[in-house]
C-alpha cells in the first residue's frame, strides 16, 4: 500500500486555543484533581505530594498570567523555558499561552552555546530558568542576547516575583488576552535536538497541537479519561511529553511530574500511574534490569522461561485461536512468580504505556504485553505536533507504529520516504525558509526524512532514516536502524552504531551498558573494578556481543549483515557530544571521535 488516510474525528474551530480545556475543566469539574505536585516551596524533587484541583490550576494560571502581563509580555512574544520536568513547567506553559505568548522550550541539559542559539534565533524577550546552574550558563552568554529583557529563576522565587507583580493587573485583562488567542496563532517554537548542524525551530500553532491531541483522545480512551493518571518524567522540552501534558489536561486525567529519574522507581510506587510514556531506551532498561536482578538472585533460568512464555503468549494473542490451554496455565504461574513483580516496578496499577522517539522492537513489545503492560508504539516528529500514527487498543500490530491517527494521511514516496499530510503538520522552520522549502511542499505534504512501509491494512513500519542509509562500496543500500535496534536489545549493550558507507562491508561500534557490566563481571569471576578499556578485546565479552550481532544479522541479507564490530571504551553521552538531548546518536560526531577504530576495522 502506498497511501493510507483516516478522516478526522475532531475539527478544531478557528477560535479555539490550548487554554480552553483549563477553563472548561474549572467550570465543569472544579474539584476534580488535575495535578498531584510536590508541596510548594520544595525543590520539585522532594516534599509531600499535594493535590491541585481543576479550579486551583485555572486560578494559578490566571495569577501567573497577570504577572506576565505586568512584566510586559505581549501577544506573540517569545518566552524561553528551561527547567526539568516539574509542575511549574506546565503552569508556566499555560500562563504564556493565556497571554498570547509563545513558549520556547529549552532542554535543561543544553549547553550555553545551545541556549544562546535558541534564545537568539527565536528572539526571546524573556526566559524562565530553574536552577543556579541554568542562571550561571545564561550569565555567560547574556551579552549576546540584546532582545532578552527579563529572566526569572524558579528556585530563587521567580514565580512568586511574577505573582506579586501581577497584583496590580485586573484579572479581566487576562480573559481579554486569552479570548484573543486563535487557533492559527503560534503556540510554541520547539528547536529540534539536531543530530547535524544547528537546531531548527519548529513553528507549531494552537491548531496544530489541538488537532493532534483532540483526534488522539477518542481512539485512546483507556489512556485519556478522568480516572486515568500518569507520571511525567520525560523532558517537557520534548514534543512527545508536551503532547501528553496537553492530552491529560484536556481529558481531565491526573498528572504528576518527576524531576529526577533517580527517584523514578520510588515515585512510581508512590503515585501508581495507570499509564506511563517513555522512549524505547527506558523500556529496554526495565527489561535488562529485570534480567540482571534475576541473575543476581540466582533465578536467571526462571526468568528466561518466564520471558519465553510472555513472548509466546503475546504472539498467540494475535492468532485466531489465541493462547492454548497449556500456554495459559504457564502464563498464570509466571504471573504469580515474575510478571506481578515487574508490574509493581511501574507502580502496580500500570497496564498501558506509550513508546515513541525510536523503534521499540517486536520482541520487547511482545515481552511487555505478555507481562501485562501493553505498550502502544507510535510515530511522529516535532514537525508533526508530534504524533501521526499509533497502535490502538482496538488495532494493535506489534512491530509496527500503528495506523495514522484521525485527520492524518501517510504516503510512501517512490524512494520509500514517509510523507505526512494533515492539520498536525507544522508551519515551517522559524527564520529558515530554505530549510522549510526542503521538507514542506506547496500542497501541504511534509517530507519526514524517515523510511517506511505501509502494510495492506494501513499499519506503518519504520525501516530507517533516509540520511542514515549506508551505501556500501558494492552499491548495497543498508538501513542501519534494523541492525542497531536488534543489537541494542542485548542486556550488555547500551549503544550500537553501524558504519560502512562507501566501505566493502557493514561494521558496528558498540558500547557496554555500565549498569549491566557489574553482574557480568561477577558471573565471569572478574574483579569488580575492571573497566571497559581492559575488556574491549576480552574473548568472553566479545563472544556475548557476537551473539547479539548474529541475532541481528538474521533480520537482513548477508550483504547487509554486520561483519565486524568494535567495543568502544566508554558509552555515548550528551556531555561528550555523541547524543542529542532526546538521546539520538550524532553519527558524524561518533565517526569523527572513533575514526581510528573505524580505520582499523577496514584495515586502512
Image (spheres, grey):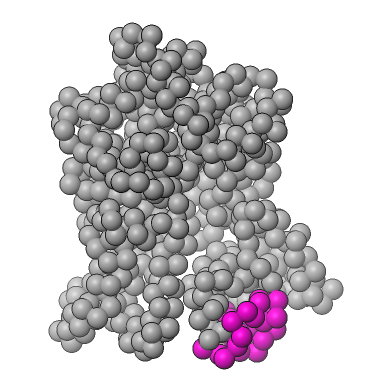
Up-down relation of residue 572 to residue 290 (above or below):
above
Residue at the (46%, 29%) spot, across then down: 157
Viewer-side residue, 342 vs 64: 64
Q: Is 534 included in the stretch rendered in magenta? A: yes
For the N terminus, give its image quadrant: bottom left
Q: In the image, 335: left or right of 547?
A: left
Report if residue 391 is visible in the image.
no
Total numbered labels = 0
Q: Is 490 included in the stretch rendered in magenta? A: no
Up-down relation of residue 220 to residue 74 (above or below):
below
Q: Quadrant of residue 256?
A: top left
Q: Please, which residue is most extreme toward the right here?
A: 604
Q: In the image, 465: left or right of 489?
A: right
Up-down relation of residue 84 to residue 497 (above or below):
above
Which stretch is magenta?
523-550
Residue at the (20%, 44%) spot, across then down: 225
Report if residue 541 is visible in the image.
yes
x, y percent for residue 445: 48, 38
Residue at the (44%, 78%) spot, across then down: 292
Q: Main secondary structure of the magenta part?
A: helix
Residue at the (64%, 53%) spot, across then down: 575
Q: Quadrant of residue 545?
A: bottom right
x, y percent for residue 177: 37, 13
x, y percent for residue 134: 59, 38
x, y percent for residue 103: 48, 29
Q: In the image, 420: left or right of 216?
A: right
Q: In the image, 173: left or right of 566?
A: left
Up-down relation of residue 215 to residue 58 (above or below):
below
For the C terminus, give its image quadrant: bottom right
Amino acid at each position: 500500500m502506498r497511501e493510507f488516510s483516516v478522516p478526522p474525528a475532531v475539527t478544531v474551530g478557528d477560535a479555539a486555543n490550548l487554554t480552553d480545556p483549563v477553563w472548561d475543566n474549572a467550570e465543569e469539574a472544579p474539584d476534580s484533581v488535575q495535578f498531584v505536585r510536590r508541596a510548594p516551596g520544595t525543590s520539585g524533587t522532594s516534599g509531600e505530594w499535594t493535590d491541585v484541583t481543576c479550579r486551583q490550576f485555572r486560578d494559578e494560571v490566571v495569577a501567573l498570567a497577570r504577572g506576565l502581563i505586568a512584566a510586559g509580555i505581549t501577544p506573540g512574544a517569545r518566552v524561553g523555558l528551561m527547567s526539568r520536568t516539574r509542575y511549574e513547567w506546565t503552569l508556566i506553559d499555560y500562563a504564556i499561552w493565556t497571554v498570547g505568548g509563545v513558549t520556547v522550550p529549552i532542554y535543561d541539559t543544553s549547553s550555553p552555546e545551545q541556549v544562546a542559539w535558541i534564545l537568539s534565533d527565536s528572539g526571546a524577550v524573556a526566559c524562565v530558568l530553574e536552577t543556579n546552574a541554568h542562571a550561571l550558563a545564561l550569565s555567560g552568554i547574556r551579552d549576546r542576547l540584546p532582545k532578552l529583557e527579563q529572566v526569572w529563576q524558579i528556585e530563587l522565587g521567580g514565580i512568586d516575583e511574577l505573582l506579586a507583580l501581577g497584583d496590580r493587573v485586573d484579572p479581566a485583562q487576562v480573559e481579554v488576552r486569552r479570548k484573543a488567542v486563535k487557533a492559527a496563532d503560534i503556540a510554541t517554537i520547539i528547536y529540534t535536538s539536531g543530530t547535524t548542524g544547528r537546531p531548527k525551530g519548529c513553528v507549531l500553532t494552537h491548531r496544530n497541537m489541538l488537532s493532534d491531541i483532540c483526534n488522539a483522545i477518542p481512539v485512546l480512551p483507556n489512556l485519556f479519561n478522568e480516572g486515568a493518571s500518569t507520571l511525567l518524567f520525560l523532558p517537557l522540552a520534548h514534543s512527545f511529553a508536551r503532547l501528553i501534558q496537553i492530552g491529560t489536561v484536556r481529558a481531565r486525567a491526573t498528572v504528576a511530574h518527576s524531576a529526577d529519574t533517580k527517584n523514578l522507581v520510588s515515585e512510581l510506587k508512590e503515585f501508581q500511574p495507570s499509564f506511563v510514556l517513555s522512549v524505547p531506551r527506558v523500556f529496554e532498561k526495565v527489561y535488562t534490569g529485570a534480567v540482571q536482578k534475576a541473575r543476581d538472585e540466582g533465578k536467571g533460568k526462571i526468568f528466561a522461561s518466564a520471558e519465553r512464555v510472555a513472548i509466546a503468549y503475546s504472539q498467540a494473542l494475535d492468532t485466531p485461536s489465541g493462547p492454548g490451554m497449556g500456554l495459559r496455565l504457564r502464563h498464570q504461574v509466571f504471573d504469580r512468580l515474575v510478571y506481578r513483580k515487574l508490574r509493581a516496578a511501574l507502580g502496580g496499577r500500570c497496564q498501558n504505556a506509550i513508546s515513541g522517539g525510536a523503534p521499540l522492537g517486536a520482541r520487547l513489545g511482545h515481552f511487555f504485553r505478555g507481562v501485562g503492560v501493553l505498550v502502544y508504539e507510535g510515530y511522529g516528529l516535532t514537525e508533526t505536533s508530534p504524533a501521526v500514527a499509533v497502535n490502538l487498543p482496538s488495532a494493535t500490530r506489534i512491530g509496527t507504529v500503528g495506523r495514522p491517527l484521525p485527520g492524518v494521511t501517510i504516503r510512501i514516496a517512490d524512494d520509500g520516504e514517509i510523507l505526512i499530510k494533515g492539520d498536525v503538520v507544522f508551519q515551517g522552520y522559524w527564520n529558515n525558509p530554505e530549510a522549510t522549502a526542503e521538507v514542506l511542499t506547496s500542497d501541504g505534504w511534509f517530507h519526514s526524512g524517515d523510511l517506511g512501509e505501509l502494510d495492506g491494512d494501513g499499519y506503518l513500519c519504520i525501516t530507517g532514516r533516509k540520511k542514515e542509509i549506508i551505501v556500501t562500496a558494492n552499491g548495497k543500500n543498508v538501513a542501519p536502524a534494523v541492525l542497531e535496534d536488534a543489537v541494542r536489545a542485548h542486556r550488555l549493550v547500551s549503544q550500537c552504531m553501524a558504519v560502512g558507507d562507501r566501505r566493502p562491508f557493514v561494521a558496528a561500534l558498540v558500547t557496554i551498558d555500565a549498569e549491566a557490566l557489574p553482574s557480568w563481571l561477577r558471573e565471569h569471576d572478574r574483579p569488580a573494578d575492571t573497566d571497559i578499556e581492559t575488556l574491549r578485546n576480552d574473548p568472553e565479552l566479545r563472544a556475548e556481543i557476537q551473539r547479539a550481532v548474529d541475532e541481528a544479522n538474521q533480520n537482513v541479507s548477508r550483504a547487509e549483515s554486520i561483519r565486524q564490530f568494535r567495543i568502544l571504551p566508554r558509552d555515548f553521552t550528551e556531555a561528550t557530544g555523541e547524543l542529542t538531548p532526546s538521546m539520538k546518536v550524532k553519527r558524524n560526531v561518533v565517526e569523527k571521535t572513533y575514526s581510528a577504530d573505524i580505520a582499523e576495522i577496514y584495515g586502512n
